[in-house]
Image (cartoon, grey):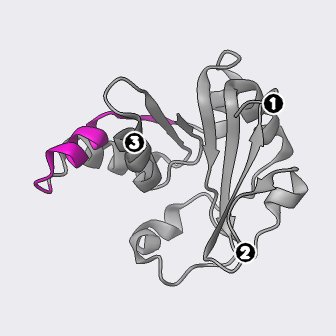
Amino acid sequence: MLDATLGLGADSIVFAYAIGENGRVAGIESQTIIAKLVEDGMKRWRNGSDALESAMRRVEVITGHHLDVMSSMKDKSFDVVYFDPMFETTVDASAGIGGVRAFANAETLSAEAVQEALRVARRRVVLKEGSEGKLHERFGFTPYRKRERQAVYSFREIGGGE
């Protein structure tokens, strides 16, 4: 699993937990200060849950812009590539990002990044965006979750995969 827009890494922790010890989760974060904070937190944070801590330790943090990093990867390097760019409309309920929002990369997802993700993925590319987002329409992704929710998940399959 490649989380191309790592941010604070919450989604990557869930992916690492779900994939298990034999899987690989890597996350790309373009902002150096956020990447360093998240990488350190993944290595050191303790909460008393061995399973959660183990999942966190398995997340590999890569510092760089997702387009540049994916451009250097081989075709079909990951089963799934995941994008969760900053929502166009701020979600006030998302307090976790509040402390580092000023450092976050707010650029919109580019067509070039989607093309690189489609090349790097073996099975699918997944996109998470705010309920008012239109990126899934712009890039031809199929919505998976209804629009009245806070986030919309959509996907594009690679070569007719599952």
* Residue occupying image coordinates x 75% and y 58%: 108
**Residue 130 appears left or right of 58:** right
The picture quadrant where one finds residue 137 is: bottom right
User: How far apart are labels 3 and 1 at the CA level?
Assistant: 23 Å
What kind of element bears circle 1?
loop
- Amino acid type at circle 1 is Gly
Q: Which mark is residue 160?
A: 1
Location of mark 3 (residue): 18
Identified by mark 3, the residue type is Ala
Image quadrant in which the C terminus is located: top right
Label 1: few (<14), some (14–19) or many (≥20) C-alpha neighbours in 10 Å: few
Of residue 141 and residue 139, the one placed in the foreground of this image is 141
Q: CA distance from mark 2 to mark 3?
A: 25 Å
Q: Amino acid at mark 2?
A: Arg
User: Over which residues does the magenta segment extend?
Assistant: 47-63
- Secondary structure under tag 3 reads helix
According to the picture, the residue beneath numbered tag 2 turns out to be 147
Secondary structure under tag 2 reads loop
Residues at badges 2 and 3 in contact (C-beta under 8 Å)? Answer: no
Q: Position of residue 130 (x, y in %)?
A: 67, 71
The residue drawn where x is 63% and y is 37% is 81
Q: Quadrant of residue 88?
A: bottom right
Q: Could you give the CA–CA distance between mark 1 and mark 2, rounded to whole angstroms? A: 25 Å
